[in-house]
Image (tube, rainbow, N blue to C red):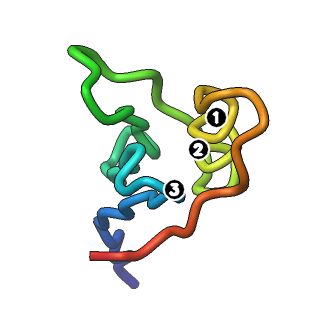
Amino acid sequence: MSTTKTRGLWVAYGTNGVVGSIRHSDDGYTVVMSGADAETGTYPSLEVAKGALYSHMRPGSGWPRYQEH
């Protein structure tokens, strides 16, 4: 039996537009904040990556809306 891994891209939207993205690969879920020159990090699950992205937003920001592309 074979296993299929899906790849994906989720864009995070805050109140003023795009705040970052999460890309799924064989290595995990990679977070990149908007305007950043480098990745924030790679995480083992989508939920952990969402939390990491949120932790890099401005203090007091609401939870972003994620849209899969």
Do the CB atoms of the residues marked 1 and 2 lie less than 8 Å apart? yes
Residue denoted by label 2: 49
Q: Residues within 10 Å of mark 1 (few under 14, many from 20)?
A: some
Q: What's the distance in space between the residues labelled 3 and 2, CA to CA?
A: 16 Å
| Amino acid type of the residue that numbered disc 2 sits on in the rendered structure | Ala
The C terminus appears in which quarter of the rendering? bottom left
Between residue 3 and residue 10, name the one nearer to us: 10
Mark 1 to mark 2: distance in Å? 5 Å
Residue drawn at the location 37% of the way across and 76% of the way down: 68
Q: Which quadrant holds residue 64? A: bottom right
Q: Quadrant of residue 53?
A: top right
N-term-proximal mark, 3 vs 2: 3
The one nearer the camera, 23 or 19, is 19
What residue did someone put label 1 on? 52
Q: Which residue is mark 3?
A: 14
| Identity of the residue drawn at 47% across and 30% down | 42
Query: Identity of the amino acid at label 1?
Result: Ala
Q: Image height check: is 59 above or below 1?
A: above
